[in-house]
Amino acid sequence: MAGTQAPKDITAEFKELHKKLSNLKKEISKTVIGQDKVIEQTLITLISGGHALLVGVPGLAKTLLVETIARTTGMHANRIQCTPDLMPADIIGSEVLEEGAKGKRSFRFVPGPVFCEFLMADEINRASPRTQSALLQAMQEKEVSVSGQPHPLPQPFHVLATQNPIEQEGTYPLPEAQLDRFMLQIMVDYPDLESEKQIIIETTKNKAEDIKQVVEKQDLLDAQILVRDMPIGENVVETILQLVRSLRPDENANNMVNDYVTWAPGPRGSQSLILATRAKALLDGREAPVVGDVIDLAAPVLRHRMALNYKARAENITIEDIITSITDTF
């Protein structure tokens, strides 16, 4: 019939996006050496349409990772260095009073650095709670309000924040509401011996690795749509629900959870885990997630959505220990 649109070939689109994402991962690895798991988890976050909190000591290429992703995707990135004197207007922008040719005065909104596609908030826990809260609306609603007027942010919009776990002088703990806005908390660890050897050789030469753009912005948007359309088995959904609900202290929880957990993940944790497992399946070239994806991503998705009590700290029990006590039962 004339005017009828041909049906979309989902399988062909899936294969094409998987190929592009594989090329993207490979291109990022040329610069960010020895951090394959960090790169994978960051891409999972972006494919899911979420935000990531990168936690690691200085010098482990957290900033380089964000810059490389921006270059390889051709998207606009801004960087904010968080300090105690950083104000909300320094992030979202402000209104300035202007006088026209006829003497008429009016306010004009001057956008801040949040109006970009990749926002890197470096050492986010150094910003005051008031400034940290300025990011809450942007991360959840994808818009900011100034003088009651909403201003939509570009699409896609991702916050990639970094945090130093060692130095706590002059820092402000991130509130639970903001931590819950991050889809994954990615732990950036030291590289292995061979990777560190490659790093010190490659980064002390005159000629740096040439990084090129390998995907378009629309490819990332298409991947985010495809992830939400991806089928997910009932057994995977049940595993996610069982895992998240088992981390909440109550009469049905195991002894470790009841003894050590103060607060646990809510429904947003389950939502993030479902999206992350789908994104991992796409990145791996599988058309649906499996239970193994849930186990692999349980800690990155849930660790920052939990808090332990003093007894756990006194007995050197970590959140990873608690999560492992549950995932080992699957």
Image (cartoon, grey):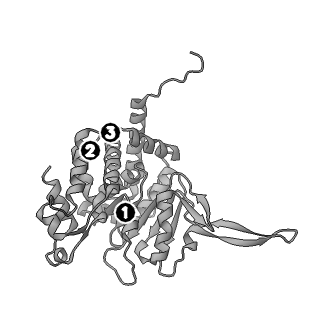
Of the two numbered discs 3 and 2 on the same chain, state the one appearing first in sequence: 2
Kindly identify the amino acid type of the residue bearing the numbered disc 1: Asp
Kindly identify the amino acid type of the residue bearing the numbered disc 2: Val
Locate residue 99 relative to residue 26 in the image: left or right: right
Per the model, the C-alpha gap separating discs 3 and 2 is 20 Å
The residue pinned by badge 3 equals 285
Q: Can you give x and y, in whole percent of width and height, for residue 116 in the image?
A: 55, 59
Q: Can you give x and y, in whole percent of width and height, for residue 6 in the image?
A: 51, 23
Per the model, the C-alpha gap separating discs 1 and 2 is 20 Å
Q: Who's the residue at 47% across and 65% down the image?
A: 136
Which numbered tag is attached to residue 198? none
Tag 3's secondary structure? Answer: loop
The residue pinned by badge 1 equals 180
CB atoms at circles 3 and 2 under 8 Å apart?
no
Q: Quadrant of the N terminus?
A: top right
Per the model, the C-alpha gap separating discs 1 and 3 is 28 Å
Q: Residues within 10 Å of mark 3 (few under 14, many from 20)?
A: some
Of the two numbered discs 1 and 3 on the same chain, state the one appearing first in sequence: 1
Q: Does the image show residue 175?
A: yes
Of the two numbered discs 1 and 2 on the same chain, state the one appearing first in sequence: 1
**In this view, 212 is above or below 5:** below
**In this view, 107 is above or below 230:** below
Q: Who's the residue at 30% across and 57% down the image?
A: 301
Quarter of the rendering containing residue 198: bottom left
The residue pinned by badge 2 equals 237
Query: Mark 3 or mark 2: which is in front?
Result: 2
Tag 1's secondary structure? Answer: loop
**In this view, 87 is above or below 221:** below
Q: Outermost residue, front direction?
A: 251
